[in-house]
């Protein structure tokens, strides 16, 4: 009996040890994992490929989930089951920062990595478009003021109904979903200032700012605006097959597909590398990468990856990310990003 008891105990110990080993294995990860913005995705993927070629660390895994979806995953918790970094085509929101804190993601490193322009583009076979923010608002808003100034469902079916100078073509715009940072930025950089130049809406803002916010944040759902998902390459393909349609996405996708598509002039400015870099093109925004400082030393190479991303060879004026369409930061801002990466400085809620 004693021998059987000993053998049973040994067997039980062996099973427990095996289970512990399996658990330890499940809790280890050798590759950095990124989620987030489809706009920042090509840039982080390029850095990941260069990083992997160094041979010291495995090539990071980068997924395109959209800025909102990516930050939700990023903020869900700490540990190998959760992403180490998030790409974002806008700055993290205060509410997202709070979610991170609530779930134990206490130390967030923010890297501003460059600038991007949001373009309205169409097939090279389609009409040229020169437009301003107010005309874009009137084309895409769910509700617009009627003749008496009261809000009505958007009545415009073709561009030339808004202004005779615009194409005599149906309004059909493929754009990003609500989880996208590109959509957030488009709303703030185009729809809000466009709405403010409509007299009835300027008055509405004075009388009821919340009602005004609902108007510029609500895109039409009758086919004039089509939620095309997070895959910007798919939008480009659809524009090729439908020359009458327009698409909204980051400048880098225009840069990569200049043989197939062309960008609209917005407020008299073309979406070019130089005009976005100078700030003259009105629909431009900074791009960000977020890292979990708590994962440094747990996931191999995270700090080294940040150093690669902020190096001159990556995001400098002649860096490989500029070749991908990223608009470089000014020299002083690049130096700040490098310092943040080296020190893994964390952000607070102030200013978000």
Image (spheres, rainbow, N blue to C red):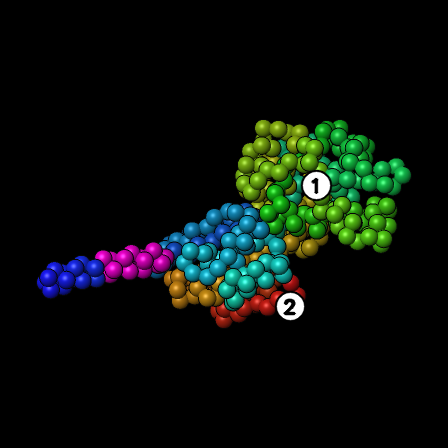
Left/right of residue 192 with respect to residue 95 in the rendered view: right
Q: Is residue 4 above or below residue 146?
A: below
Q: Please state the horizontal and vertical placement of residue 217, each as a whole percent of the image.
A: 71, 47
Left/right of residue 32 with respect to residue 74 in the rendered view: left
Q: Secondary structure at mark 1?
A: loop
In terms of secondary structure, what is the magenta stretch mainly? helix
**Of all residues shown, which one is farthest toward the right?**
148
Q: Which residue matches tag 1?
A: 219
Q: Which residue matches tag 2?
A: 350
The image quarter containing residue 178 is top right
Q: Please state the horizontal and vertical placement of residue 127, each as a whole percent of the image.
A: 69, 31
- Report the magenta residues as a range: 15-29
* Near-viewer residue (281 or 239): 239
Mark 1 touching mark 2, by CB under 8 A? no
Q: Residue at x 60, y 47 (%)?
A: 180
Q: Secondary structure at mark 2?
A: loop
Tell me which numbered mark, 1 or 2, is placed earlier along the sequence.
1
* Near-viewer residue (276 or 227): 227
In the rendered structure, does residue 277 fall within the stretch colored magenta?
no
Q: Residue at x 39, y 53 (%)?
A: 59
């Amino acid at each position: 009996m004693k021998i059987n008891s000993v053998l049973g105990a040994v067997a039980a110990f062996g099973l427990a040890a095996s289970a512990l080993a399996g658990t330890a294995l499940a809790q280890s990860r050798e590759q950095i994992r990124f989620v987030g913005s489809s706009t920042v995705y090509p840039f982080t993927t390029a850095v990941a490929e260069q990083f992997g070629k160094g041979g010291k660390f495995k090539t990071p895994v980068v997924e395109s989930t959209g800025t909102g979806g990516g930050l939700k995953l990023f903020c869900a918790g700490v540990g190998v089951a959760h992403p180490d970094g998030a790409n974002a085509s806008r700055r993290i929101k205060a509410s997202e920062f709070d979610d991170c804190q609530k779930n134990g993601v206490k130390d967030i490193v923010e890297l501003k990595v460059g600038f991007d322009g949001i373009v309205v583009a169409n097939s090279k076979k389609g009409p040229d478009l020169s437009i301003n923010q107010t005309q874009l608002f009137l084309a895409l808003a769910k509700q617009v003021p009627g003749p008496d100034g009261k809000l009505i469902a958007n009545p415009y079916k073709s561009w030339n109904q808004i202004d005779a100078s615009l194409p005599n073509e149906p309004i059909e715009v493929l754009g990003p979903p609500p989880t996208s940072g590109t959509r957030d930025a488009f709303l703030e950089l185009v729809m809000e200032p466009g709405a403010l130049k409509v007299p009835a809406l300027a008055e509405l803002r004075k009388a009821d700012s919340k009602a005004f916010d609902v108007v510029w944040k609500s895109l039409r759902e009758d086919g004039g605006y089509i939620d095309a998902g997070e895959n910007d390459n798919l939008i480009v393909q659809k524009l090729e097959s439908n020359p009458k349609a327009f698409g909204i996405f980051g400048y880098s996708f225009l840069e990569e597909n200049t043989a197939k598509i062309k960008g609209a002039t917005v407020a008299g400015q073309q979406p070019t590398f130089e005009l976005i870099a100078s700030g003259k093109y009105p629909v431009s925004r900074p791009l960000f990468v977020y890292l979990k400082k708590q994962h440094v030393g747990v996931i191999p190479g995270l700090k080294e990856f940040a150093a690669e991303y902020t190096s001159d060879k990556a995001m400098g004026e002649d860096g490989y990310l500029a070749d991908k369409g990223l608009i470089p930061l000014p020299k002083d801002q690049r130096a700040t990003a490098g310092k943040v990466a080296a020190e893994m400085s964390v952000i607070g809620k102030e200013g978000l």
